[in-house]
Image (cartoon, rainbow, N blue to C red):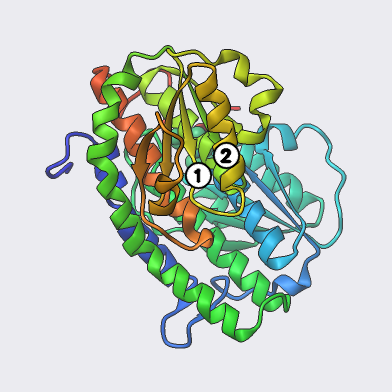
Amino acid sequence: EKGNHRHFMVKEIYEQPDACQHTLTAYVDPVTGHVSAPGGFDFASVTRLQIIACGTAFYAGLIARYLFERLAGLPCDVEIASEFRYREPAVTPGTLAIAVSQSGETADTLAALRWCQAKGLKTAAIVNAHESTMAREAGMLWPTHAGPEIGVASTKAFTSQVTALTALAVAAAAQRGRIDAEEEKRLVRVLLEAPRLVGESLGVEEMVQALSLEISKARDVLYLGRGAMSALAYEGALKLKEISYIHAEGYAAGELKHGPIALVDEATPIIVIAPTDELFEKTVSNMSEVLARGGRVILITDEAGAAHAPAGVSVIIAPTCDPLIAPLVFAAPIQLLAYHVAVQKGADVDQPRNLAKSVTVE
Ligand code: F6R
């Protein structure tokens, strides 16, 4: 079943262009070029979004917040389900609660979804397992089409969640009158390019593999990013610790000087995820701060970013893309990095210790 691949995880990393493509077909009409929620939903009818999820799905939600707020002007909160369900959150009428879950069975996410329904909120579930409890119980089912995910560390389910959420944010922007028909068309074109660019991003594998031996020797690794890339920094750190058992932390790059910079030394690789955007120069300053303290920096960026990388930085070059889909295009490099480091360490990549694919206990 693994085909030519050594592990399900890497097979699933390589299935991402297809997973992204299949998921898009549920959200984008290829003929009209119109993007909408499956089954139809008008984002102009809500005043706020509350995304609830755990683990990797939570990070997909964090990425979505940048898109819903920036593109659609729609206030969006994102919270870990286990916190949300117990803290007695204040309910704003007009809120749409969106549960995000690969399995559709995660106990805390399901409980949070039920809590929202009991409070009378509209609910939707972005799930990959279409026969799951969340798929059945949510007011609306917004599917991802990643296909079955076997590897315990989520990869294609994550990028499928980001795909669905990105499409929904474009739909929300159009429905709320924040973008005109022309801009909607342009963004849909960008969305439809995502599967190809995600495929191209797999081309970093050799560069990543070449760095994996060095990283496999580290005790700690830091991941940094700004904007939506901060969520990818958290996800990169989660992936690495799950399968390689190396301690890793993701930080919003601007937080570096507020504490984590104390950890910088030559033995702690700092992985910076930074496509060229309006914040790139700020991230260059962060890298310079790290280098000045003898730190080791690995930069995942695009062609233009590579040209501006400070001397002494190792660069992994991902495809150049529109910022809308950068979280999708930059996901594979961090997944492949975690994968190759784990393989270097001889870890059981598909069955990491202490972890279960679906967390149905609270
Ligand atoms: C990480 C991972 C977990 C899940 C989390 C939520 O690689 O797989 O963090 O993302 O347990 O699971 P679902 O999406 O099934 O609710």
Q: Count neighbours of disc 1 (C-alpha within 10 A) and say few if under 14, some if 14 to 19, many if 20 or more.
A: many
Q: Count neighbours of disc 2 (C-alpha within 10 A) and say few if under 14, some if 14 to 19, many if 20 or more.
A: many
Pinpoint residue 310: horizontal percent, then vertical percent: 46, 35
Residue in view at x 26 percent, y 21 percent:
213
Task: State the CA–CA distance, disc 2 to disc 1.
Answer: 7 Å
Pinpoint residue 275: horizontal percent, then vertical percent: 48, 49
- Secondary structure of residue under mark 1: loop
Q: Quadrant of the N terminus?
A: top left
Residue in view at x 65 percent, y 53 percent:
66
Q: Amino acid at mark 2?
A: Thr
Nearer-N-terminus badge (2/1): 1
Residue in view at x 18 percent, y 41 percent:
2
Q: Which residue corresponds to mark 2?
A: 283
Pinpoint residue 127: horizontal percent, then vertical percent: 50, 53
Q: Quadrant of residue 31?
A: bottom left
Q: Amino acid at mark 1?
A: Ala
Q: Quadrant of residue 205?
A: top left
Query: Is the Cβ of the residue at disc 2 closer than 8 Å to that at disc 1?
Result: yes
The answer to whether the residue bearing label 2 lies less than 8 angstroms from the nearest atom of ligand 1 is no
Instruction: Using the image, tell me which numbered label, if any, was put on residue 274.
Output: 1
- Secondary structure of residue under mark 2: helix
Figure check: 237 above or below 305: above
